[in-house]
């Protein structure tokens, strides 16, 4: 699972960075002790051309934030092969990708500490149940989902601005005729996820100075009802803003919500840099190593039995 090895060296080598200078220098990165558990990004989807590039880019950001950190990705279901390819065929570059269970088993067989499992989720999701069960079986630590968090609100804001639905920042006071005057934060994970997204919605509303409500893409009628609520309270140009990273959401759900409501939609968060930074800080907190300006994040309690 090593991601940074020098040819000929038996083990990965951690390369310390030089200390930045100046009063506005970036806070020093905390040091991850040698022998620490690996970071395992748990992806709530099968590997494939939609999910894998996002996952690999996010892990690249994590390695940039914490050089030398052991990283790996595990997917939701069995190994994925190119469509129609026979078992073991990797000709098309769609090499089999491991499941979360397979990565945990590999670590145990190698006598390594159980990795810290970080769900690639912005909030509650059914995928967490399977992760908790695996944690019970393997002794791995599973962190909470990544949200709610101010960094996610920032990422949603940027995606809205990229779609021409919001100002890029609050300092620019000129009007954009296509800017939304109300936002529906769309999530997956049912009503529980929509409720949890309310906190990120408050943070986003403070950034945009427009009303923001959350709705579940996977609950029929939820997004349409949220749009109607915004219109009833005065919004004339509501827009949809996915609070999803990407792999956890069926693209058809996103497209259908936009089509049924007639509202423009921003893109999913994808591999936006702050998502990778949030993954890195979540890993540090799980090791009880707070990042610069970060409070430790809770490791999720596993259900009894």
Image (cartoon, rainbow, N blue to C red):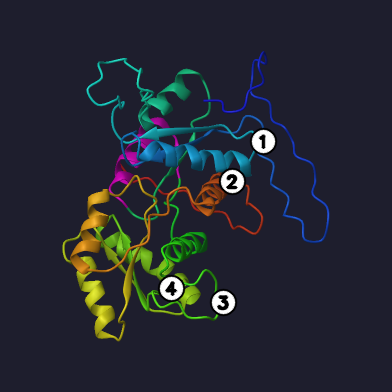
Residue that lies at the very extreme toward the left in this rendered image: 220
* x, y percent for residue 279: 51, 47
Residue 126 lies within the magenta run: yes
Q: Assign a secondary structure to mark 4.
A: helix
Residue that lies at the very extreme toward the right in this rendered image: 22
Tag nearer the camera, 4 or 3: 3
Q: CA distance from mark 2 to mark 4?
A: 26 Å
Q: Would you say the residues marked 2 and 4 are in contact, meaning their CB atoms lie under 8 Å apart?
A: no
Q: CA distance from mark 2 to mark 1?
A: 11 Å
Which is nearer the N-term, disc 2 or disc 3? 3
**Res 141 seen here:** no
> Foreground: 212 or 304?
212
What span is colored magenta in the figure?
125-142
Is the C terminus in the top left, top right, bottom left or bottom right quadrant?
top left
Residue position for label 1: 33
- Which secondary structure type mostly characterizes the magenta part of the structure? helix
Residue that lies at the very extreme toward the front in this rendered image: 177
Which is nearer the N-term, disc 4 or disc 1? 1
Question: In the picture shown, does residue 165 fall above or below 242?
Answer: below
Q: Which residue does the image show at 69% across and 46% down from the upper left?
A: 30
């Amino acid at each position: 699972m090593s991601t940074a090895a020098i040819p000929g060296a038996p083990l990965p080598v951690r390369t310390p960075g030089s200390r930045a200078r100046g009063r506005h220098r970036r806070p020093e990165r905390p040091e991850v002790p040698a022998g620490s558990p690996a970071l395992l990004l748990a992806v709530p989807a099968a590997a494939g051309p939609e999910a894998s590039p996002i996952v690999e880019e996010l892990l690249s950001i994590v390695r940039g934030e914490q050089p030398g950190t052991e990283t790996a990705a595990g997917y939701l279901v069995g190994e994925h092969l190119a469509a129609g390819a026979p078992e073991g065929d990797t000709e098309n570059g769609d090499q089999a990708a491991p499941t979360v269970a397979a990565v945990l088993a590999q670590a145990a067989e190698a006598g390594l500490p159980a990795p810290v499992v970080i769900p690639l989720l912005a909030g509650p999701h059914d995928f967490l149940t399977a992760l908790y069960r695996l944690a019970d079986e393997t002794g791995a630590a599973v962190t909470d989902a990544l949200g709610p968090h101010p960094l996610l609100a920032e990422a949603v804001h940027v995606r809205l601005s990229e779609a021409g639905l919001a100002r890029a920042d609050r300092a620019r006071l000129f009007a954009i005729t296509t800017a939304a005057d109300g936002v529906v934060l769309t999530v997956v994970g049912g009503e529980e996820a929509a409720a949890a997204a309310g906190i990120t919605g408050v943070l986003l509303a403070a950034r945009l100075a427009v009303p923001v409500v959350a709705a579940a893409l996977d609950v029929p009628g939820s997004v349409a009802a949220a749009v109607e609520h915004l219109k009833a309270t005065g919004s004339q140009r509501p827009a949809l803003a996915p609070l999803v990273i990407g792999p956890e959401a069926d693209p058809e759900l996103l497209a259908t919500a936009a089509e049924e409501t007639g509202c423009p939609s921003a893109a999913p968060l994808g591999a936006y840099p702050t998502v990778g930074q949030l993954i890195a800080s979540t890993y540090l907190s799980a090791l009880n190593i707070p990042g610069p300006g970060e409070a430790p994040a809770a490791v999720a309690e596993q259900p009894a039995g």
